[in-house]
Amino acid sequence: PVWSGNGEDLKQESTLHEDLEVLTSWFAGEFDNKQQVQSEQPILDSIPELDRHRRTHITHTRLDLPQLGNRVFYIEEYIHDDPSKISRQRIVLFQVDEKANAVRMRLGMLRNEKNFLGAGQDVSKFTDLKKEDVYFMEDLVPGAQCDVFWRRKAGQFEGAMLDKACKFPATERVSRETYNLHELYLSEDQYWRFDAGFFVDDNTRMIGASRDNPYKMSRAHRFACKGYDSLPGNPPLTADAANKKPQMFSVHTQGGWATVPVAGGNGMLRVSLDTRRH
């Protein structure tokens, strides 16, 4: 970049661009909250239903889409350890915001989002994406400001929406004015997310986890293996294992799994990988 202004301006701009590089490199990849969900199981009955965490697996895939920006990611999430249960698809754009002294993240949505299912493993699905295929909350609700502002804090990044800025008017389904709030925490191997909706008039939580106990996801590393079957979503067995050449499949390290036939076709073996923080 071409620097301009006085020394303090240059220092701030340089730091923000460095933050952008580190933040987006950590943001890329897969995250899963299996450890959090497991830790809640013994005391689940004592946790209010609104505060319980469902198993969530997130994939953040960097995209080459200059028509949208220089730092573009596709987000795909599934729940309950089932890749067919997609809970969220988003396009996010990162950019330096010198005025806010932060890295700004815009949250976009896809028109015809079903066309992009699985795009984290097949980015060619975005080859013909046009700028108008992505829309933002302010396109639906004029005045809504739902961007997240990231700032470095010690060895991690903390991101948040402006207070009560991502606001929505009352509707037939929800009779009171509401607002959404994101508070995010990202380090090299952890991604924590508080994402909830509130009523404007009294700040009562309407949906989402508790601020005191956000979704706590650990980075998942993916390994490629050889076997006779694969993860859900890949081609299933079509012939007896003894007569079928091994095919590649992958598992991730936060409870990822696959089933493969035992040699000779006598039964099935479940393969799982799991790493834990101590």
Image (cartoon, helix red, strand yellow):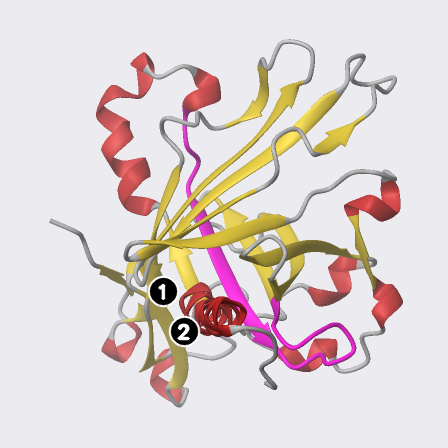
Magenta residues, start to end: 52-73
Q: Is residue 267 above or below residue 153?
A: below
Which residue is labeled 2 in the image?
A: 229
Q: Residue 217: x, y in percent?
A: 36, 49
Q: Is residue 241 magenta?
A: no
Is 67 part of what is drawn in magenta? Answer: yes
Considering the image in quadrants, where does the N terminus appear? Answer: bottom right
Rendering coords of residue 105 (x, y %): 61, 57
Determine whether 167 is above or below 255 in the image.
above
Identify the residue shown where x is 66% and y is 28%: 164
Above or below: residue 196 compared with residue 128: above
- Kindly report which numbered mark, 1 or 2, lies closer to the viewer in this rendering: 1
- Quadrant hosting residue 275: bottom left
Where, by quadrant of the figure, is residue 95 drawn?
Answer: bottom right
Residue shown at 28% from the left, 63% from the top: 253
Tag 2, which secondary structure?
A: loop
Residue behind mark 1:
258
Depth order, front residue of 234/101: 101
The amino acid type, in three-letter code, at marker 2 is Asp
Q: Report the front residue among 93 and 254.
A: 93
- How crowded pointer 2 is (Cα within 10 Å; few <14, some 14-19, many 20+) is rated as many
In space, the residues marked 1 and 2 are separated at their CA atoms by 7 Å
Percent of width and height locating residue 278: 11, 49
